[in-house]
Structure formats: C-alpha cells, structure tokens
Image: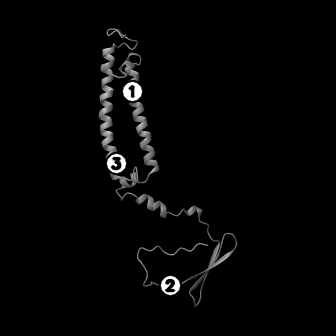
Amino acid sequence: MNNAKMWLVVSPTVGVPLFLGAVAVGSFAVHLQVVKNTSWVADFLQGVPLGTGDKMSAADVDSSKLKVAKASYALDTVAGTEVTVILPDGTHAKVILNMPEQHASHQADQLPLTITR
Amino acid sequence: MTDEGKVWPTGLTLGEAEEVHSYPIDGTRVFGAIALIAHILVAISTPWLG
C-alpha cells in the first residue's frame, strides 16, 4: 500500500498519535475561527433566525464614542419645545421639539428621522 | 529490493507495516465521508460559503 513503508522507520506509537493530534488540532483551530468570525453559529446556538446577530450589531450604537453635551436648556415656545444644547466644542445648537404627528404617508417599517450635525 | 522478512528499526516487517497502515487509511476514509456529509449539510443550511 502507498506510503506503508513509513512505519518501517516511524514507530506507530509516535506516528499514529502525531497524525490524530494534527487532525484534531487543525480541525479545532478552523472551527474556532469560524465561531469567532461569524455570527450565524451563535444565532443557531441561541435558536434565533440566522443573520439576527449581524442585524443587532449593525443597529448597535457604541455609547463610548458618543460625546455628551455639557448642558441643555428647554424652553416652551409657540413653535414647540425649544432645546438649546451646548456642544462639547463650545458651540451651541437649537432643536425644536414638536408633538409627534403621523402623516398619511407614514409607513410602519420606516426608521425614525435621525438628525446629525 | 525489500526483504519481506526483514525487521526494520521500528521492529516491524513490511507486512506488519502495511497492516498498521491500513487502519489509519480506513479511519481517514470514514472520517472524511462523515465530514463531507456534515459540511454539505452546513453549506446548505447556513450562510457559510455564501
């Protein structure tokens, strides 16, 4: 048989455990990296639809990167509640908060409006 | 020019070496067949391989 002569110079007590160990270590390493680098294994183990983990992480906001305003002031005006925010760089911004209105064009799956400066 | 009855440094003859070799070969074939089926099932049922 092909390569059978290796056992004439490599003792089976060394070669067989070495071979089985290499297979075990290699297989474990590959599967560990799959578990570490994908979300669908965790999704499967948690019994949720595959892809849920990716959606969750995409929607996740890293709160440590958010800058907190030093102060804000709210004032009720005719237009609505006017909020003045002093930003971390010392500038300030004003926001008018109105009571939520639901328009005829509203769709239930729409994301809320996000205002960025 | 291998002497069939010669005892080699590992203490095996050629016939014994071939018998020893047949077990890892059979084991590898069974392992490979099970692994192949398992990987096909994973490829079908998960996003793995796109």
Residue B38, position as x, y percentages in the image: 32, 44
Which quarter of the figure is the N terminus of chain A placed in?
A: top left
Q: Earlier in the sequence, mark 1 or mark 2?
A: 1
Q: Indicate the secondary structure of the residue bearing disc 2.
A: loop
Q: Which residue is mark 2?
A: A99
Residue A82, position as x, y percentages in the image: 60, 83
With A94 as the anchor, is A3 left or right in this view?
left
Q: Is residue B31 above or below residue A14?
A: below
Q: Chain of mark 3?
A: B
Q: Residue at image x 30%, y 43%?
A: B37
Q: Which residue is mark 1?
A: A17
Kindly identify the amino acid type of the residue bearing the numbered disc 1: Pro
Instruction: Using a 10 Å C-alpha cutoff, classify the residue at mark 2 as few (fewer than 14 neighbours), some (14 to 19) or many (20 or more).
Output: few
Q: Are marks 1 and 2 in contact (CB under 8 Å)?
A: no
- Marks 1/2: CA–CA distance: 72 Å
- Marks 2/3: CA–CA distance: 50 Å
Q: Residue at image x 44%, y 51%?
A: A38
Q: Nearer the viewer, mark 1 or mark 2?
A: 1
- Quarter of the figure with residue A80: bottom right
Q: Chain of mark 2?
A: A
- Counting labels gives 3
Using the rendered image, report if marks 1 and 2 lie on a common chain.
Answer: yes
Number of the label disc, if any, that sits on residue B5: none
Residue A107, position as x, y percentages in the image: 42, 78
Residue A90, position as x, y percentages in the image: 70, 72
With A34 as the anchor, is A93 left or right in this view?
right
Q: Which residue is mark 3?
A: B42
Q: Is residue A62 above or below residue A83?
A: above
Q: Is residue B43 above or below residue A79?
A: above
- Marks 1/3: CA–CA distance: 29 Å
Kindly identify the amino acid type of the residue bearing the numbered disc 2: Met
